[in-house]
Image (cartoon, rainbow, N blue to C red):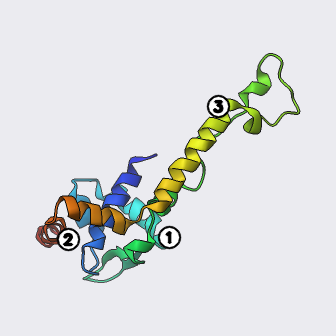
Amino acid sequence: MNEGVEWAMHSCVNLSWASGEAVTAKRLAAFYNLPTAYLNKQLQALTRAGILTSVSGPKGGFQLARDPRNISLLDIVVAIDGPDDAFRCMEILKEGPGADARADYTKVCVISQAMRGAELTYRRELASRSIADISDEVVRLTPAAPDNTRNRFANLKS
């Protein structure tokens, strides 16, 4: 999983506290001292996926396109890293001793099956957690987080 996934998730949580106002990529990047150009690529991917909207003009920037309850962590992972599984069985057993050229080793290989099971568990967990869930948990742990986030955005240069 690339680091852009983490950056995108944190940006979505912060945008959930932005009171519907658009926040520039520069401000979102400055919040965590991230490279603006690279974060902007992640934000554009989220926009293409319908998670964010991009607003033009002097008060432009990015904002959530959907209610945070309707944005799962899996939505963000897929937007940034794509829909492919993290593990891809290359069926190397076909080259091993006693191999059966007709066998579909993605289905009979114990390692492939273990990795597929882990992938399904991971995806189910990410699909079950929304940006609202994460935001709520952060507020439970740090009640001032939304106000602190809005104040920091207000004090960062565009």
Label 1 environment density (alpha carbons within 10 Å; few <14, some 14–19, many ≥20): few
Between the C-alphas of marks 2 and 1, the distance is 23 Å
CB under 8 Å between callouts 3 and 2? no
Residue 111 has which mark?
3
Q: Residue at point 30% right, 72% down?
A: 16
Q: Please indicate whether residue 98 sits to the left or right of residue 117 in the image.
A: right
Residue type of the residue flagged with mark 2: Ser
Report the residue marked by disc 2: 158
CB under 8 Å between callouts 2 and 1? no
At numbered mark 3, what does the secondary structure look like: helix, strand or loop?
helix
Residue 86 visible in the current orientation? no
Residue positioned most to the front: 140
Q: Please indicate whether residue 157 sits to the left or right of residue 60 in the image.
A: left
Residue type of the residue flagged with mark 1: Arg
At numbered mark 2, what does the secondary structure look like: helix, strand or loop?
loop
Residue 22 visible in the current orientation? yes
Residue type of the residue flagged with mark 3: Ile
Q: Earlier in the sequence, mark 3 or mark 1?
A: 1
Along the line of sight, which residue is nearer the eye, 107 or 81?
A: 107
Residue 132 x, y percent position in the rendering: 35, 69
Residue 93 x, y percent position in the rendering: 75, 25
Report the residue marked by disc 1: 48
Total labels drawn: 3
Q: Earlier in the sequence, mark 2 or mark 1?
A: 1
